[in-house]
Image (tube, helix red, strand yellow):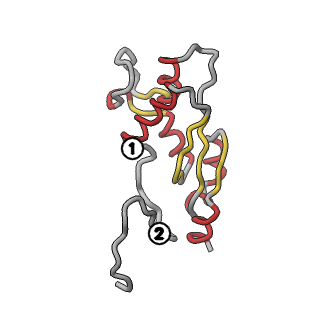
Amino acid sequence: ILNTGLLGERKGVNLPGCNVDLPALTEKDKEDIVYGIKNDIDFIAASFVRKGQDVKDIQQVPTRTNKFMDRRHVTPECNFVKEIHDQYWPPEHPVPGIISKVENQEALLNFNDIMNESYGIMVARGDLGVTSF
């Protein structure tokens, strides 16, 4: 240990060369998406997207574990964002797009997949500089 200082709350840790296995969405993220859709957001900014599947995971959440969904939907997977949208808005109202934030080497390696699944991309230049070079 070179530094015995304490790491404070809400601080990031860069792990160059490591693939991190974290879920794309937390329960708090799902609550925030529901709140945002109710309040007519245009986009969902998804941080720490590492692969295209992360974007799909934001869109598709198993209904059986999704407390935000109307229980009449019984399919094993649904489009979480669209289904929540449809509970509050008419069909012609635009569904929020997902803007994926590319922050590390793993995301760079999977950039094309992320881009294909996303409405748009934002790049964390500082984080990429720390983890990629």
* Residue 15 circle label: 2
Q: Residue at x 52, y 27 (%)?
A: 39
Residue 120, percent from left and from top: 67, 43
Residue 54, percent from left and from top: 51, 45
Please indicate whether residue 132 sits to the left or right of residue 20 in the image. right
* Residue 121 circle label: none
Q: Quadrant of the C terminus?
A: bottom right
Please indicate whether residue 44 sits to the left or right of residue 112 in the image. left
Q: Residue at x 54, y 42 (%)?
A: 55
- Depth order, front residue of 16/96: 96
Using the rendered view, name the quadrant where residue 74 is placed: top left
Q: Please, what is the three-letter code of the amino acid marked with disc 1?
A: Thr
Instruction: Work out whether mark 1 precedes mark 2 in sequence or the reverse, and give the earlier one.
Output: 2
Q: Residue at x 34, y 18 (%)?
A: 71
Residue 15, percent from left and from top: 47, 69
SS at mark 2 in the image: loop
Q: Please, what is the three-letter code of the amino acid marked with disc 2?
A: Leu
SS at mark 1 in the image: loop
- Depth order, front residue of 23/26: 26
Q: Gap between marks 1 and 2, in whole Å?
A: 21 Å
Q: Is residue 73 above or below residue 47?
A: above
* Residue 26 circle label: 1
Q: Are marks 1 and 2 in contact (CB under 8 Å)?
A: no
Using the rendered view, name the quadrant where residue 63 is placed: top left
Q: Quadrant of the N terminus?
A: bottom left
